[in-house]
Amino acid sequence: TPTDIGVHQEDLNAGKQITLTSTPRAEHNEPIPWLALQLGDRGGIYVGVQFSGLTRIDARVENTHRVVLTAGLHPGNFPFRTRLLSGETFTTPPVFIGAYAGSVDDGANRLHRYVERHIRPPVRDRRYPLLVNNSWGSGMAVDEALAIRMINDAANLGLELFHVDAGWYRTVGDWHTDLQKFPNGLEAVAKYAKSKGLKFGLWVAWTQGGASQRPEALSVHKPDMRSWFPHDLPQDWKPSDFTGECVCLACPSAEQWCLRELRRIIRDYQLDLLEHDQWMLLENCSRTDHTHTNHPTDVSYRCTTAYYRIYDALRQEFPDLLFEDCLNGGRMVDFGVAARAHYICATDTYDPLSNRRGFWDASYPLPPSMVESYVGHYPGRTLANFVYMLRSGMMGWCTIMCDTTQWTEEQHRAAKRQFQVYKQWIRPLINRANLYHLTDRPDGVRWDAVQYFDPASKKGVVFVFRGTTKEDTHTLKLKGLNPNRTYQIRFEDKTNPNTALSGKHLMQNGLTIKLPETESSELVYLEEQ
């Protein structure tokens, strides 16, 4: 769940130091390994670490007002130590730095283009980012009959990918179809989804070992696998429904097993999308026969590089496959993952406020097309509340995590319209436009808004949200427009009259919007004349 803090600004005065520590498990208030240093309204620089292990960014201002910036692996609390075999090379993580003029948003937009061109895996589907329906709206209860119903409804709504979440397998670590739930096999569901024009995706917590004694399972109790895990577990240990014990990828045998298993899963289940979830990269491991030393940074370094080898190999073998990073809902968000995953879950909490906060934070360092929101059921009173729920997850990659077969006919019509708008107007802007954070970070009470504007197509959209405040009218100052041009302004829900205003007026005086209901929203379309 996003905290109350999120991405924020701090003054960096002489003698002050800021330290950002990032881990593969994201503790409370932990940052994405990215920092922007802003000098008034003149511009600034940004820095990021392209790695998923233990990293740190330090920025301090000396008494001479010189800023000293350090970024890379976390040095740890005792001297770093690694082990190199004959002929082996130790490669430090990439660190990038960029300069920009203007605001933090201006710098973030430059960074978005850099990530899209030089870090993110190639995108082969022209519909990217896709609209997804995920089975977790019914939790672990997913089975073949439910999946078929959800696929039919997803196709009718105009969604583009059906994603089976946790609950399809025999048990954690045994990543084979539970034939009691899917008597015709998971591949039959994949085939049916594709017959309806949908891609097919699958949740796999492939680093998690269980207690199964089946020969094909990853198990903490098997004599030949026990040493793959960071420590021995008691014989009565059992996994939960969707978590187990994380294997140490710094064990070469474990790395090889995971790669073989993922190849099988992708082929057998005809995947278009592979989602990984649960803890993947360790920092502590007691084993002495793995490639790491006892230093936590080295443990995480070796696990991270093994994870990269696995996904880099899969991308070479399956160039059309999409990759999603979830990892307990936004607990491993970094530029190393961004080089392997096409999109990243920003939060594993599905309510509108959490989705808007998660997007608000992650859309500074990451392109908005890569920032996924899970739209879960939200008990609103009116249709406007329902649309507010949808739009709170439609600013980037949108995954519907509801059983849409339970929606009313009125809600179906409204959702179908929102998905059409997403495809025709919003998605092109997500991919090409500049993004501006127009208000303070969402708090669920005040109004909040973000704006897209594409100077090339001269089109834009403003996502406007009213929280629980009694204030039914609000003025937003737009950004990134040409002050000397006129802009046609249309309102999707017709809550306000269409109008035409100059870019100068919109940026200096603002656009005044009225929304009569609490927890409601509007899409404001901009077109330069």
Image (tube, rainbow, N blue to C red):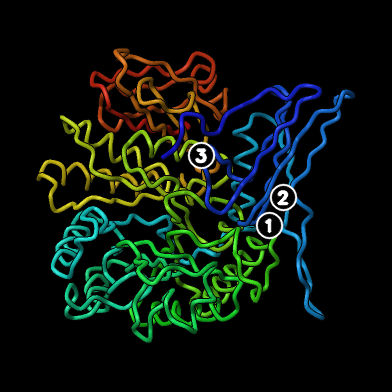
Residue 188 location (% of width, % of height): 22, 78
Nearest to N terminus: mark 2 or mark 1: 2
Q: CA distance from mark 2 to mark 1?
A: 7 Å
Q: CA distance from mark 2 to mark 3?
A: 19 Å
Q: Residue furthest left?
A: 409
Q: Is residue 422 left or right of residue 370?
A: left
Which one is in front, 529 or 504?
504
| Mark seen at residue 28 | 3
Q: Helix or strand or loop: what does disc 1 sit on? A: helix
One can see residue 378 in this view: yes
* Res. 380 image quadrant: top left
Q: Residue furthest right?
A: 64
Q: Is 447 drawn above or below residue 169 in the view shown?
A: above
Q: Helix or strand or loop: what does disc 2 sit on? A: loop
Q: Residue at x 21, y 31 (%)?
A: 384
Kind of residue indicated by mark 3: His
* Res. 303 image quadrant: bottom right
Q: Residue at x 40, y 36 (%)?
A: 356
Q: Circle 2 is placed at which residue position?
A: 76
Nearest to N terminus: mark 2 or mark 3: 3
Whether pointer 2 and pointer 1 mark residues with C-beta atoms closer than 8 Å, the reply is yes
Q: Circle 1 is placed at which residue position?
A: 297
